[in-house]
Image (tube, rainbow, N blue to C red):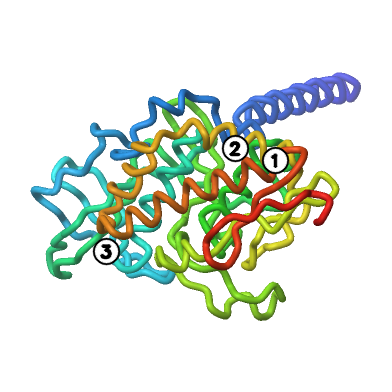
């Protein structure tokens, strides 16, 4: 009898362990390690006026319902519901325009992003009427999971991840903290996406000092004039592109190789002038600031392209012009 009990106990334990293994394997199939950061797409077909949500997700502004205030961050934010019942996070203030444009440029290259739109004027019942409001979608089928790190993620050694890092410098995003990176889970297709969720501190000036304790000095956000006066590339040395970056997590730019710069350049060069213009038109910039931002984006693409070449680079100097220098001088 005792032997029988021991035998049955062994069988039950074996089945339990097997069940746990199968369950773990099943969970692993949908683990965040299997997530995506970037997808190869037809860049020329991307609509940067409406962005990742397209025309079909554009908010119904006829009947806005206030839900609650959202705490945290630099900008004032509200959770609202539009006339179609979709929920959004409304961001008001200086970051709304820059984030709207930055998301479109990042998404245009194939990276996963939030869905957002810039509303020139929006009345939120009980809260007031605001100008230039960024609405960021909160779809029912998307779950917001944990944060991911710039130094530890499944894509660290890939060109697409290195390209994303370069894009953060390209946009002058000086706030590369972990809390701005989030993993989204799409319940409709069981897909995990790694995204940079907050791109509001872009299109301004990086901190003015490379020392970590001083990088905050002189920084700005959504300032086209400051953005125009800054540069992307400091030079090339030992097959490494020296990115001009003073901001949080600056160490992630220490080893940007020429191959990664060339990979990203090949994507950026597929953007048409109209697409670049649409990104800033969607963010409701004035014609003056649109012209400045469009030209600066084109200049930075040129900087990156020349830095990824083998013989010489052309770098931006203080007066905004370009100077050609042999790579051996770096």
Q: Is residue 256 left or right of residue 174?
A: right
Residue ID at (16%, 59%) = 122
The x and y percentages for residue 142 are 41, 39
Between disc 1 and disc 2, whose residue precedes?
A: 2
Q: Residues within 10 Å of mark 2 (few under 14, many from 20)?
A: many
User: Which mark is drawn over residue 172?
Assistant: none
Residue that numbered label 1 is attached to: 308
In terms of secondary structure, where does tag 2 sit? helix
Residue tagged by mark 3? 68
At x 55%, y 52%, the residue is 170
Cα–Cα span, label 3 and label 2: 42 Å
Quadrant where the image shows the N terminus? top right
Q: Is residue 211 left or right of residue 85?
A: right
- State the quadrant of the C terminus: bottom right
Residue 233 x/y as whole percent: 65, 55
Per the image, the residue denoted by label 2 is: 265
With 188 as the anchor, is 40 left or right in this view?
right
Asked whether, in this view, residue 44 is left or right of residue 89, the answer is: right
The residue tagged with tag 1: helix, strand or loop?
Answer: loop
Q: CA distance from mark 3 to mark 1?
A: 48 Å
Q: Answer few, some or many: residues within 10 Å of disc 3's Cα (few below 14, many 20 plus, some between 14 and 19).
A: few
């Amino acid at each position: 009898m005792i032997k029988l009990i021991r035998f049955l106990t062994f069988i039950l334990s074996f089945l339990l362990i097997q069940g746990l293994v199968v369950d773990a394997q099943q969970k692993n199939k949908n683990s965040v390690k299997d997530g995506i950061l970037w997808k190869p797409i037809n860049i020329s077909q991307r609509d940067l006026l409406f962005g990742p949500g397209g025309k079909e997700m554009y908010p119904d502004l006829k009947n806005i319902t206030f839900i609650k205030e959202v705490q945290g961050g630099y900008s004032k934010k509200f959770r609202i519901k539009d006339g179609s019942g979709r929920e959004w996070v409304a961001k008001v203030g200086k970051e709304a325009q820059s984030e709207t444009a930055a998301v479109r440029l990042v998404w245009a290259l194939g990276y996963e992003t939030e869905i957002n739109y810039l509303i020139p004027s929006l009345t939120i019942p009980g809260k007031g009427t605001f100008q230039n409001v960024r609405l960021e979608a909160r779809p029912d089928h998307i779950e917001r999971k944990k944060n991911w790190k710039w130094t530890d993620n499944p894509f660290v050694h890939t060109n697409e991840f290195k390209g994303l890092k370069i894009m953060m410098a390209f946009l002058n995003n000086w706030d590369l903290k972990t809390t701005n990176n989030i993993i989204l889970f799409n319940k409709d297709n069981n897909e995990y996406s790694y995204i940079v969720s907050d791109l509001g501190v872009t299109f301004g000036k990086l901190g003015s000092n490379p020392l970590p304790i001083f990088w905050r000095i002189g920084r700005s956000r959504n300032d086209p004039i400051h953005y125009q006066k800054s540069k992307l590339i400091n030079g090339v040395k030992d097959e490494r592109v020296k990115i001009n970056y003073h901001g949080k997590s600056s160490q992630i730019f220490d080893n940007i190789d020429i191959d990664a710069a060339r990979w990203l350049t090949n994507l950026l060069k597929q953007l048409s002038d109209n697409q670049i213009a649409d990104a800033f038109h969607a963010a409701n910039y004035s014609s003056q600031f649109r012209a400045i931002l469009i030209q600066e984006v084109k200049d930075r693409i040129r900087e990156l392209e020349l830095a990824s070449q083998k013989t010489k680079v052309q770098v931006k100097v203080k007066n905004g012009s370009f100077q050609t220098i042999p790579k051996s001088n770096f």
